[in-house]
Image (tube, rainbow, N blue to C red):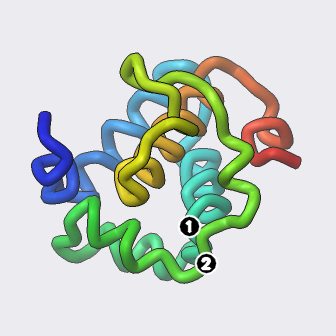
Amino acid sequence: MSNEKVYQMDFFRVYQLLVDKAVRKGRTRDEVDEVIRWLTGYDQAQLDGMLQKPVSYGDFFRGAPHPNEKRSLIKGVVCGVKVEEIEEPLMREIRYLDKLVDELARGKAMEKVLRG
């Protein structure tokens, strides 16, 4: 799938997939929301608002109010690619979230997921 197709995906649909993945593994929607807020700087009201209107996945990340400075500590492989080696900044941000939700779903403690 091309980067542009990923950027155009509906944020609500991607969000539901992320939540479903976490819930299947015994985690909660609230924990996914916490990860998203930590990564992007959105507060819960802003995140809820983004879920109520049509927003592309790319625009969700482009509009992130305060991307977390510690996000560069996120390392590892997502979809066969090391996130720290992704050159395109927007795709790297998207893969950071994928990696965090993967860690959450694998049972990693929230403090470690959030690089505490």
The 10 Å Cα crowd at callout 2, few under 14, some 14 to 19, many 20 or more, is: few
What amino acid type is highlighted by mark number 1? Thr
Q: Which mark is residue 106?
A: none
Up the image or down, 45 lies above or below 113; here it is below
Q: Give whichever of 27, 104 is nearer the camera.
A: 104
Q: Find out whether the residues at labels 2 and 1 contact each other: C-beta distance under 8 Å.
A: yes
For disc 2, the marked residue is 66
Q: Residue shown at 40%/79% (left/top)?
A: 63
Three-letter amino acid code at disc 2? His
Check the picture and name the quadrant holding the N terminus: top left
Find residue 35 and report its horizontal and vertical position in percent: 62, 51
- Where is residue 7? Give x, y as percent: 21, 56
Identify the residue position indicated by label 1 in the image. 40
Q: x, y (%) of residue 52?
A: 27, 73
Q: Residue at x 75, y 57 (%)?
A: 70
* Mark 1 surroundings within 10 Å by alpha-carbon count, few (fewer than 14), some (14 through 19), many (20 or more): many
What secondary structure is marked by label 2?
Answer: loop
Residue 71 or residue 111, whichever sits in front: 71
The residue positioned 81% from the left and 31% from the top of the image is 109
Q: Is residue 6 left or right of residue 98?
A: left
Nearest to N terminus: mark 2 or mark 1 = 1
Compared to residue 98, the image places residue 51 above or below, namely: below
CA separation in Å, label 2 and label 1: 6 Å
State left or right for residue 105 relative to residue 81: right
Where in the figure is residue 66, as x and y percent of width and height?
61, 78
Q: Does residue 47 appear left or right of residue 104 in this picture?
A: left
Residue at 72% across, 65% down: 69
Q: Secondary structure at mark 1?
A: helix
As drawn, 77 above or below 1: above
Q: How many marks?
A: 2
